[in-house]
Amino acid sequence: MEKKNLDWENIGFNYMQTDKRYVSNYKDGKWDDGALIDDANIVMNECAGVLQYAQTVFEGLKAYTTESGKIVTFRPDLNASRMVDSARRLEMPVFPEDRFVDAVAEVVRANAAYVPPYGSGATLYIRPYMFGINPVIGVKPADEYQFRIFTTPVGPYFKGGAKPITICVSDFDRAAPHGTGHIKAGLNYAMSLHAIVTAHADGFDENMYLDSATRTKVEETGGANFIFVTKDNKVVTPHSSTILPSITRRSIMYVAEHYLGLEVEERDVYFDEVKDFVECGLCGTAAVISPVGKVVNHGEEICFPSGMEKMGPITQKLYDTLTGIQMGHIEAPEGWIKVIG
Ligand code: PLP
Ligand code: COI
C-alpha cells in the first residue's frame, strides 16, 4: 500500500478528508450490519435529535505506525466501553463494544495510506461518534441513530509540539456535579467554546477548569486531564466524578508506577497547592502529554520550575515511555496494543 504524498511533519491538528468512513444505522431497536462508505457528507431531517437537542457522543483514539512498520491502535477497548457510558447517560442505544473495536480496525485498514509513517510525529486520529438522526420536537430521545467513524491524519494538538504552554484559570465552569462532565458528549464541548475563545483572545493556550461546586479544586482542561509532579517525584492527578476518565491519563499513571517505579496518587488537588508542584502536564489522545509551563489566575502567575523551554524530567520520562509503547519500541502491557495491519 502506497502512502499519500503528504507533508507529514507539518500537518497540524486539522480535519483532512480521507477515503473511507464506517457507518451503521440503528432503527426499529437494532443496529444494521454497518459498512464502509465513500461519502463524507450526512443528509438528515431538519428536526433530527442531534440538531435540536444535541444528542451526540463521540470518542477519539489514534492509529500509529510502529518502528517495525505495523499499524496499531492503543487500547481501543477502553474507548468502546467509555462510549457505552456516554450513550447510556444520553439515553442512546449502546453500540456493541466488540463491533466498535472491529469497526475501528476496518476503517483504519481502509485508510492505511493516510496513517503517517513512523518517526514523522504525526498519527491517524480516529473519531467514532453517534447521534440521534430522526425528527424529534418534544424533548425526548431519538428513536433512530447513526454510528460513524472517520479518520484524519494529525500532528500536535498544541502548536509548537512539546514546548510548554500557558494556561489560565477559567471563570467559566465546564461540568456540574451530577451532570455530564464524565462522559464524552458534544454538549460539553459546545459550552466550552466561549471559554476557549476567551482564553485564546487573552493570550492563553488553554483553560484550567475548577470544580463548579466549590471552585477550590483542579478538574481538567477542555480536552485533557492534568498530571502534576511533586518535589519528591510523586505523580499526582485529580480525582473527580465530573472529569472525563482519560485513557491516556490512566495509562500514564500505570506507566509511572509499573515502568518508572514512581509513587502515584489520584486524589483531590486543591488549586492552592498547584504552586507547590514542580511539573505539570496535560494528557489526552490529542494532547499526548503537553507540558504546562505557567498557570495564570487573574494576573497571578504560577511558573513551574520546569520552565517554558522544555518538558520537566519526569514528564519527559512519562512521555518517552508512553509513546515508546505506542510506537512499539517499548514492550506494552498485555492487551494495550491492537495490531491492525
Ligand atoms: N478530557 C477531555 C475533556 C477530553 O476531551 C479528552 C479527550 O479525549 C481527555 C480528557 C483525554 O482523554 P483520552 O486520554 O481518553 O483521550
Ligand atoms: C481527544 O483527545 O481525542 C479529544 O477528543 C480532545 C479534543 C480534540 C476534543
Image (cartoon, rainbow, N blue to C red):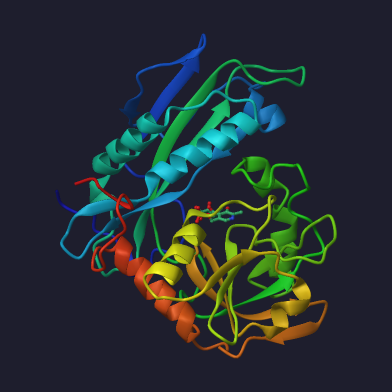
Q: Residue at x 19, y 46 (%)?
A: 341
Q: Residue at x 63, y 86 (%)?
A: 304
Residue 301, visible in the rendered structure: yes
- From this view, report whether residue 227 is shown above or below residue 326: below
Where residue 87 appears, as percent x and y from the top left, is: 58, 31
Residue 7, visible in the rendered structure: no
Where residue 165 appears, as percent x and y from the top left, is: 59, 77
- From this view, report whether residue 317 is shown above or below residue 337: below
- Of residue 54 and residue 182, the one placed in the foreground of this image is 182
- From this view, report whether residue 23 is shown above or below residue 105: above
In the displayed structure, does residue 203 sit left or right of residue 74?
A: right
- From this view, report whether residue 184 is shown above or below residue 326: above
- Of residue 38 and residue 339, the one placed in the foreground of this image is 339
Where residue 137 appears, as percent x and y from the top left, is: 74, 18
Q: Furthest residue to the right?
A: 214
Where residue 71 appears, as percent x and y from the top left, is: 23, 52
Q: Furthest residue to the top?
A: 28
Q: Quadrant of ligand 1?
A: bottom right
In the displayed structure, does residue 295 sit left or right of residue 151?
A: right
